[in-house]
Structures are given as C-alpha cells and as structure tokens.
Image (cartoon, rainbow, N blue to C red):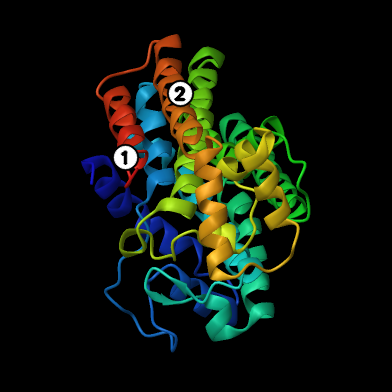
Amino acid sequence: MPPALLRARDMIEPALRESIRDLAPDIQRVVGYHLGFSDAEGQPVAGEGGKAVRPALALLSAEAAGAPADVGIPGAVAVELVHNFSLLHDDVMDHDLERRHRPTAWALFGMGQAIVTGDALMVLAQRVLMEPATPEHSSAAAALARATAGMIEGQAQDLSFQSRLDVSVDECERMSANKTGALLSCASSIGAILAGAGDLEVASLAEFGLHLGLAFQAIDDWLGIWGRPALTGKPVAGDIREQKKTLPVVIALAAGGPDSDRLRELLSNGGLSEAQVSMAADLVERCGGSERTRTEAGRHLALALGALDRAPLALPAREQLEEIARFVTARDF
C-alpha cells in the first residue's frame, strides 16, 4: 500500500472520530460500527477501515497546490463521510450481507437505521465544511454538494439500467462518471480548493480524479464477471447473475451479431441458471466485452495521469497522486 494511504488514515481518523461525536447516540453507534471503530455493542475494536483513497487524494491535492496537508483535512473528512453514506445505502439496495469481512450495518441494525445513518453522514459532511465560514470552505462545500448530487444521479441511472437491454456504451460511461467519478474528482481537488488554488490547478486535479474514477469503475466491472472470488470476495460472474448492465455487458450487447443476440435473449428471460450465467459470461467475452473494458481502463488511467501535466503541481505530491492512481487500478486484472 502506498505510504500516502497509510498517512491519510492516521491523519484523518482523529478528525473523523471528532466529527461524529455530536450525532445522536443510536446513529453514532451504527456509524462507529460501520467505520470499524467499534463492535455491534459499541465497544472499541482495533479494526481496520477502508484504504482511505479519497482522504489521501484530498490531502495530496492540498499539497499539490503548495499548502500543508493539514489544510485538506476538512475536505478529506467530508468526502469520506459522503463515501460512507453511499456505502450504507448501497448495501441496503444490493442486499449485501457482508462488508470488510463483517456483517453490513443494515444486516445488524435494520434497513431503516442504516438508511437514516447514511442520511446523517451526508448532512454531517456539509457541516464539516461550514466552519470556519471562509470563501474557500464555501467553495469546497459547493464542490462536494455537486459531487454528491452527481453520485446520487449515477446510482439512479445504474438502477434504471437493470430493466433495460438497450443501454449504450456512452450512457454507461456517463453513469460511471457520475456514480464513481464525481466523488473521486471532488476528492482529488477539494484540498486544492481549501488551499485557495487557482482555477487551472483545481481543474487539472478534478480531471485527474474523474478519469481515475472511470478507470477504477471499468476494472471493478471487469472483476464483477471474471475476478477471482478469493480476491474480490464475490462469486465469479456475480454481476451477470444479478443481471447488472456493467461496461462489459453493455459493450457485448451493443456489438451485434449472433453471440450478442444470444446474450440479449438470455438476459431477457429473467433469472438465470448457473449454466446460463456461465454461458452469458462466455458470450460477453466473445463479443469483446472483456478486452474492450480492459482497454478502456488503461485509456482512462492514461488520461488521469495526463491531466496532472496541465498545471504546475508541487512535488512530491504529484508523484504520490500518480502512485495512488496506479495502485487502485492495479487490482487482479
């Protein structure tokens, strides 16, 4: 793991813990559990949270703009809160029973409590950026609000795709740009906004994060079909079993020809048997879904790295941004 990720976890945890202290006790208990700070009874545990990719990007973007990493802490905490709001809701919508090798929050505390807790985190993220009331904090709050709205729109688009077989590749990319790219774009630039950086620096970092999100999502979509369960924690072809219109599937459906038509026929018949799931995965690959998805991931990674060339960003923060980008896109691919 890149050192910048380990540093980010150490830097934001005290601020993250402080930010949730004013939440209602019932909500605070669910948040503490979800973040890995406590067990289901609220007792402290020495658990490990996520990789802190978004907080690391926020801290590094402040440094890339020539400011100390501390300047980016409010942004780092805010994007992490929004990210976890989305995870709480995603687990409910996907009926996932496990996250980070523990039961999900809704599985322990109920759907209603998980949804309310997610809502509380979204509001709290904005509160974190409201004080002090400086122009930089106001701009950061506005950027986070836009990213959150984009992420929610992307989730709605993703849900609407489940009942469609005519999703275009462009539609799929726009959905990914919203669902995944929007918050990573915000995380990659919010520290620079808090540092009072110029438009060129902020735009360069935001573009970096957007393409990083698209590369990340393409890889995630590939792993959702062909990833090894031992590494992904999910069954082979799980996204096909759930009939999700991820990038490889959309590419295959748009390819035309007998294999594409057969895939469309399979996905039109409701629930799939295990034999049909395996057949559908093979058809997606034969229609170019695997190869083109891998190509798209590489293309967006290159665009992300190229975006950093468009502004005079400080070293070594820029180099560490590149290191994180390569790390998060170098999964079992």
61 relative to 281 in the view: left or right: left
Residue under numbered circle 2: 299
Q: Is residue 72 visible?
A: yes
Q: Is residue 141 visible?
A: no
Label annotation for residue 32 = none
Judge whether 240 appears above or below 274 on screen: above
The residue type indicated by label 1 comes to Ala
Q: Residue at x 60, y 70 (%)?
A: 273
Residue 148 percent location from the top left of the image? 65, 46
59 relative to 272 in the view: left or right: left
Mark closest to the chain's N terminus, 2 or 1: 2
Residue 56 percent location from the top left of the image? 36, 42
Camera-side residue of 156 and 204: 156
The residue type indicated by label 2 comes to Arg
Residue 235 percent location from the top left of the image? 44, 66
Secondary structure of the residue carrying numbered label 2:
helix
71 relative to 157 in the view: left or right: left
Q: Residue at x 41, y 56 (%)?
A: 15
Label annotation for residue 330 = 1
Disc 1 crowd, CA 10 A, few/some/many (<14, 14-19, 20+):
few
Disc 2 crowd, CA 10 A, few/some/many (<14, 14-19, 20+):
some
Judge whether 122 appears above or below 258 on screen: below
